[in-house]
Amino acid sequence: MNDENVAGAVSLKILAERKLEWIGKTTQFKIDPRKLEVEDGFNARIPGDELDAHIAAMKESFKAGATIPAIDVRVDDGRVIVVDGHCRRRAILELIAEGVEIESVDIRQYRGNDAERVAHMLTSAQGKPLTPLECGKSYLRLIRFGWTKPAIASRVGKSISHVEQMILLAESNSDVQAMVAGKSVSAAVAVEMVRKHGENAGPVLQNHLDTAKAGGKKKVTQKTISAASQKPSDLKYEMRVSGPDDVICFRDELEALRLANSINKQYLQDRIANPESEVLCVATVHEPK
């Protein structure tokens, strides 16, 4: 460090104005938070109790005097639109509605195209990490923007396998996603079941959840699934899907038939919608040999 250049400086602004190579200024602005807008469908966060609790904790932190980090925005035809900081915006607006005086918040302008804004949101989420389902839906958006899986993995600092698994989860049916969002099953178990059962993963997971609840458990685990495949002596019926390698055992014949009918109904609907599909999926119920 050259003492001649820094001598007498009492602020970062003064140091930056001396054109030193190792320090510079960034531009931030202040804005009335009520002027901040959001783009419909852009925010990766999924509404629910978990997000509400995160917002509530953030509000308590702000009321206690915590610094509100700058919100990243873009400007479009005079509109100031949030790129990263949706939770902060919501927390601030709720506090204002409750009578807390917040006249302005710091903002920074983000420059990048539509795909780059999604990638930025993925890598800059503050406070509460994105859930696997939230990540998967954002990865899927990047795929639709033309990004490759290796490019996504490199940008977010994850493995290609992770990106592939989260995209598979994002492409799963709504019943599977609802169970993951509701913490009835982990993302890892859900992905494994989607790989094995495809469109029928939802009904199969629901059956495992019913079994888990009957045993006093709250969620489906790999242990739950493994136990169902061990065929204890009191499991008297098997439901087979597309061959003997995909077998689920039941104590009650009606339960087996219910799940088989649900799977076959879904298969017929899919074939009607996609008559060229070569996928064959037939669920049948048998007594174990």
Image: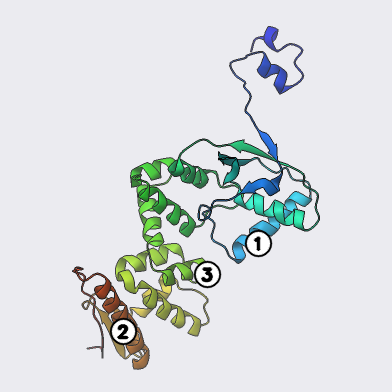
- Rendered residue at 60%/42% (across/down): 80
The disc, 2 or 3, on the residue closer to the chain's N-terminal end is 3
**Residue 2 found in image quarter:** top right
Report how far apart the C-alphas of labels 2 and 3 lie in the structure.
24 Å
As shown in the figure, which amino acid type bears the numbered disc 3? Gly
Location of residue 23 in the rendering, given as x and y in whole percent from the top left corner: 62, 20
Using the image, tell me which numbered label, if any, was put on residue 252: none
What numbered label is drawn on residue 182? 3
Instruction: Identify the colour scheme used.
Output: rainbow
Quarter where residue 209 is shown: bottom left
Query: Badge 2 is on which residue?
Result: 260
Q: Which residue is mark 1?
A: 53
Could you tell me which residue is drawn at 58 percent across and 16 percent down? 21
The vertical placement of 117 against 57, above or below, is above
Tell me which numbered mark, 1 or 2, is placed earlier along the sequence: 1
Furthest-top residue in this view: 4
Spot the residue most to the front: 77
Q: Considering only vertical position in the picture, is 235 above or below 139?
A: below
Task: Identify which residue, 243 or 130, lies in the foreground.
Answer: 130
Is residue 66 or residue 101 the one in the foreground?
A: 101
The picture places residue 95, in percent across and down from the top left corner, at 75, 55
Q: CA distance from mark 3 to mark 1?
A: 14 Å
